[in-house]
Amino acid sequence: MQKKIYLLLSLSLVILSCSKFEQIKDHFDDPAPGNKNDFTGANAQGEALKNYQLEPIPYLFKKIYNGDKLKQIITGYYNHGVGLVEGFDSLAVIYTSQQVIFLRSNKDTAASFTMHANGKPIKARASRLMRPGEPLQTFNFIYSNGKLEYLLMPDNMINDVYAKIQYEAGKKNISSLSVQNGTLDVNDKITYTWDHTKKVKSQFYADEGTIANFWKFLCYLNWLEELNGENLLQSVYIEGNDYPYDMIRKYSNHKLDSKGRLTSYYASETRAEHGTENEPRKWIIYWK
C-alpha cells in the first residue's frame, strides 16, 4: 500500500513539473519576453544611431527588433560613471523553450537567461564584465513582492551577493543599489534621489554609475520595469570602494515625449577627490 502511494505521489510530481515546463514553453513561442514599451538605444551626442561607425563615442548601445521580438543588441560601451569603457559586441538573440541566449559572431555565448512564464529572468549565465573569453558564471534572480531584490552568484565563494536592490516604500523607485564592481570582493553603493512631484511612463539613464557590466547589460535589456523608477531621477550618490571613488551625479533638463517617456536629459558630476562639477553631458534616449 505504501509503495502504491509513493508511486502516485511521484507521478503527480512529474505531471506538475511537465505542466510548469509547458507553461514556460508556451510563453516563448511569441511574443518575446520583457517590456514592450522599450528603448532602442542611447548616445551622448544626439547624433543618428545609423552613423555610429563614424562617431568617436558613437552610442552606448542599440537594439534591433523584428516586430516585437528583439533580434540583435549591439553594445558600444559600458558606462561606469566617469567615462565610457569600450565593450563593443554585436550579439544575436536566440530564443528556446525556456531561455534567451545572446551569441557573439563566433557563436560563443555572451549570456543566457532562463525565463519565468511572467517574462522575468530567474537565472543567467554570463561573465561579470561581459568580455569575450571570460568564464561564464551563474546569477540567480531573487524577487520580493514582484520586484528584483537580489542577484546572487553561487559560484563566487568570496562574495555571493552580486547586487542588492532596495526600493522606496510603496513605490517603484530604487532607493539604493549595492553591486559588485570590477573586483569580486568589493561592492559599490548607489543612493537614488527622485522627484516625487513628477511621474514618468518610462525612462533610462545611461550613466547612473558603477563598474558592473553585467548589471548594465541587464538594464539595457529593460526586462525589469521596477529598475527604471516611476518618478524622474534627480541625482545619484555613488560610494565606490574602488575606481571611480565617491561622486554625486545630478540630472536636469529632462525632456519627455507625448507618451511620458524620457527622451533626453543632462548629467553633471562632482567627484570627491577634486570637488568641482564637470561640464554637463547631454544624453539622448531612443524608443520603439
Image: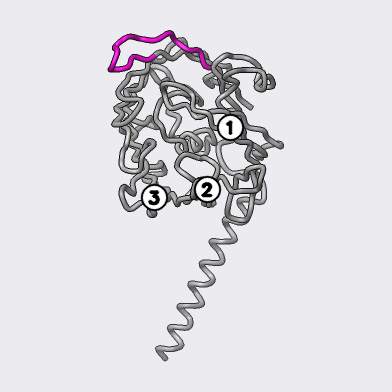
**Residue at mark 3:** 153
**121 or 29, which is in the foreground?**
121
Q: Is residue 224 above or below residue 61?
A: below
Is residue 103 shown to the viewer in this render? yes
Amino acid type at image mark 3: Met
Q: Does the magenta portion include 275?
A: yes
Residue at point 43%, 12% (across, down): 252
Q: Nearer the viewer, mark 1 or mark 3?
A: 1
Of all residues, the one furthest to the bottom in this rendering is 1
Residue 9 pos. (x, y %): 45, 78
At a point 63% along the width and 53% down the height, the residue shown is: 96
CA gap, disc 1 to disc 2?
A: 30 Å
What range is drawn magenta here? Answer: 269-283
Question: Which residue extends farthest front?
Answer: 133
From the image, state whether disc 2 or disc 3 is nearer to you. Answer: 3
Q: Residues within 10 Å of mark 3 (few under 14, many from 20)?
A: many
Indicate the amino acid at tag 1: Phe
Q: Amino acid at mark 2?
A: Asn
Q: Is residue 20 left or right of residue 175?
A: right
- The one nearer the camera, 86 or 201, is 86
Secondary structure of residue under mark 3: loop
